[in-house]
Amino acid sequence: MSHVITGTVIKGSGIGKKLGLPPTMNVHTKEVPKTLKFGIYAVRVKMGGRFLPGVAHYGPRPAVHAPKSFEVHCWDFGRRKNMYGKKITVEIVKRLRPVKNFKTIAGLKRAIERDIAQAQKIL
């Protein structure tokens, strides 16, 4: 896959934090190439000269009734630092699955855990 997204980290809706989902860095969707399909992706994120493995979501968020977003979770990064206003570059490595609607937040959390595990194997 040859998509690379560079953008400034913006404040998200905060829904994930309230639901206990993994922390994400959000980039405005206008930075995403029009050719990128909605879905979940294994990614590499360049921040300050180093690359971190991660998983990205691009598209609508039907399980939490929220509009489309582009957000990235880097499991080796955690919540150590405020990234708002910082530039990141996201290299799309592989599409893991399409966006799905989950009937429960527990189902969404299980899917995120599977997505992270799958991305860890790829990266």
Image (tube, grey):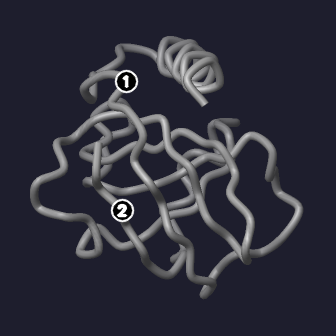
Q: Residue at 74% across / 65% down in the picture?
A: 50
Residue 27 image position (x, y, % from top left): 44, 69
Residue 35 image position (x, y, % from top left): 10, 54
Q: Residue at 23% across / 75% down in the picture?
A: 30
Q: Residue at 21% across / 41% down in the picture?
A: 38
Residue 6 image position (x, y, % from top left): 42, 74
Q: Is residue 32 left or right of residue 84?
A: left
**Tag 2: amino acid:** Val
Vertical relation: 36 (above or below) 120: below
Q: Give the numbered dot on residue 96.
A: 1
Q: Give the numbered dot on residue 4.
A: 2
Neighbour tally class for label 2: few under 14, some 14-19, many 20 plus, Cα within 10 Å: some
Q: Is residue 117 left or right of residue 12?
A: right
Vertical relation: 75 (above or below) 35: above
The extreme left residue here reads 35
Q: CA distance from mark 2 to mark 1?
A: 16 Å
- Quarter occupied by the N terminus: top left
Snapshot quadrant of residue 53? top right
Snapshot quadrant of residue 123? top right
